[in-house]
Image: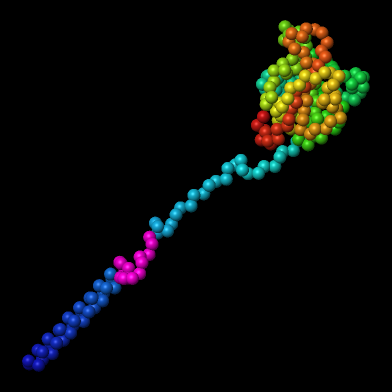
Amino acid sequence: MATAKRVSSSRKALVVLLVAVMMAGLGTSAWSFLSPRPGKPAPPSMASVWHPVEVTPVPQSAVSESDLVIPASAPVRLEIPNISFDSSKLAGGTSNPIQQWTKAMNDAAKGVVTPPGKWESSLVWDSTVAGGGLFGTDAQSSGRILAHTTPWTWDKDKQGAFQHIRDVHVGNAVVITTEKGRLCYNVTKLDSVLKSQVNVVYGKDAVIPGIVYLMTCDRPLDYGEGATTHNLVVTLQLNQQQTNTGSC
């Protein structure tokens, strides 16, 4: 019996030892999932290695834009907002008072361009200049539009169509609508030139694409009714960017 008890005690002791060893092993394994093993660095947290990327959108203005092409054609409307001028409102609202100055008219007038018709509503565009005097982004000519000024300032109903054109300033916007589209210009120069020298300074044979001249008699307000000796020439430069966007 004593021998059997000793065996039983030995077995119990062995079982206890085995259980202790197993528990010790499990404890070590469980700990190894929660903390790094000695001698190895801890893996970095996601917060320390992930950085959000900020996307900067490309501004619309940086996107390339093709220039709008408006084929050369005759003008049908002239607008100068700064002096409240609109040719479509002249002559009782005539749709297109800007008439063509032809070679036959030029020959008959011996080269002196005089807009026919009423002072207050008569405008012409000169087709006798080099390139035909057409208007457009691809026009290979220098366009000309001419109108009258008058000596009588007291009767607004009888003043020339270009009576107040001397009030424009460099930088002012001018809009010319043609049979093919709308063109935006800016005033770049105002010049008083002897009538005998106009075609020399602003020659009919000169071809400067994108340039338009507005011409009239240079008649100061206190000039009186005498014949004028000078022409007032307002130079316009095509603004391609505004023409592209229609923002004039």
Going by the image, does 81 lie left or right of 196? left
Depth order, front residue of 149/78: 149
Residue at 74%, 38% in the rendered image: 69
The magenta segment is: 32-45
Count the marks: 0
Q: In this view, does 175 lie above or below 36?
A: above
Front residue of 167 and 34: 167
Confirm whether residue 72 shows in the render. Answer: no
What is the chief secondary structure element of the magenta stretch? Answer: loop
From the top left corner, tell me how far across and down residue 103 is, in percent.
Answer: 90, 25
Find residue 208 and report its horizontal and vertical position in percent. Answer: 80, 32
Is 44 left or right of 196, judged from the image as shown? Answer: left
Q: Nearer the viewer, residue 223 or 11?
A: 223
Q: Can residue 200 be seen from the camera position used here?
A: yes
Q: Where is residue 243 in the image (x, y as percent from the top left)?
A: 70, 34
Residue at 84% over, 30% down: 206
Residue 194 in magenta?
no
Say which quarter of the image contains residue 92: top right
Residue depicted at 18% across the width and 81% down the height: 17
- Image height check: is 8 above or below 218? below
State yes or no: residue 43 in magenta: yes
